Image: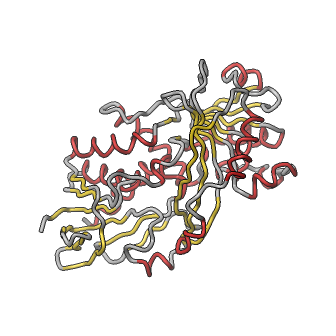
Amino acid sequence: MPSYDLIIIGAGALGTFHAYHAAKAGKRVLLLEKDQYPIGATVRNFGQVVPSGLAGRWFEHGRRSLEIYRDIQQETDLTVRQNGTVYLASDADEWTLANELHDRYQRIGYTSELLTKAQCLNRYPSLKPDYVMGGIFFPQEMSVEPEQMIHRLIAFVQQKYGVHYRPGSVVIDVQANAGGAAVTLSNRQQFQAAQVLICSGHEVRLLFPDVLAEADLVVSKLQMLLAEPVAGLNLPGNILTGLTIRRYEAFQECPSYAGMHYPDRLAELKKWGIHILFKQAVDGSIIVGDSHEYAEATQAEDLGYYTQDFINELMLAEAKRIVAFPLLIRKTWAGFYSQTKAEIFEHDIDTTIRIVTGIGGKGMSSGAGYAEESIRQWLVDM
């Protein structure tokens, strides 16, 4: 039976960054993925690395993640582009929060720049003047191409650090034994490891379903749109808007957040968890989104496998209030991720088997830094 120091189940961003940090620390690592390539939340998102919107330890993990992305990008092309993040305030309440967040980040040395309305329109001439009151810009933040990044990261950890990667490997059983734990695949092939880490995303039924049923996990369904390229359009960086200011945790910690007014016209958007973001891909197409619907993880089927046209229409209508370029939709899709009220679900089945899931929408922004700390702490027991 092949033996490893660490077997990681799930090759999304969270699992693969754990593999990177463990292998970099000298561990012999096997990375298993049930599909032929990752198809979950890691590839169904904006590809925005935006620590500025996070709070608490997740901001710190995000800040460290920027450094990790930058370091790897110097060795191999992960599609990382350091072109910054802007949050566009559309009214006085949102502008107040932008100013308060700027003040906080100045105190802790995280670079941000307040932009006047004129500066926003000069930097992003495709914005509609009636929408913008001002903005807050974070020059160090990054974009990646989500459908490419994970494949390049997996290739990098294989080539540079000798991680063994097996896609199309469905794990049906993990059992502790005298040597650590044994992992059994659906074809009955087995592998042995001193430690096993399960990073299975919103999948809660294949392994340890009883544990995950009690984990208070919720699955979020997001709808997203891809618009056709527009000749001559240059939309640099991550473009986040007033609804994002109203939604993200970092702004919720600002002094004025509790007193914010919510205009009646935003009620339907709030009901469906809609906030509008834009990111232009390297081919010129524009990702627009997103929405949020929720269900208990054990009842994720209730969210449906389809996208709802009226939600897409709500997002498009709001997007057209913000930008002047045409939005001709090429395709739509739904993404799914798990989250928990405890910020992340970390559970030791025993001393050799650990489950980490429920990171929510923070994986691309903070997963690299979180995985580094997770492996560093766990290596004490390895």
**Image quadrant where one finds the N terminus:** bottom left
Question: What is the residue that sits farthest to the bottom in this orientation?
Answer: 210
Q: Is residue 187 above or below residue 43?
A: below
Q: Is residue 215 above or below residue 89?
A: below
Question: What is the residue that sits farthest to the right in this orientation?
Answer: 264
Q: Is residue 155 above or below residue 136?
A: below
Q: Position of residue 158 (x, y in %)?
A: 23, 46
> Which residue shows up at 59% across the image and 22% down it?
234
> Which residue shows up at 24% across the image and 51% down it?
23
Looking at the picture, the colour scheme in use is secondary structure
Residue 263 in the figure: left or right of residue 182:
right
Residue in the foreground of this view, choosing between 181 and 186? 186
**Image quadrant where one finds the C terminus:** bottom left
Residue in the foreground of this view, choosing between 51 and 377? 51
Residue 110 in the figure: left or right of residue 258:
left
Q: Is residue 291 above or below residue 102?
A: below
Total marks placed = 0
Residue in the foreground of this view, choosing between 154 and 134? 154
Residue 84 in the figure: left or right of residue 95:
left
The quadrant holding residue 374 is bottom left
Q: Position of residue 76 (x, y in %)?
A: 31, 33
Residue in the foreground of this view, choosing between 62 and 214? 214
> Which residue shows up at 51% across the image and 75% down it?
215
The quadrant holding residue 231 is top right
Q: Position of residue 13 (x, y in %)?
A: 40, 51
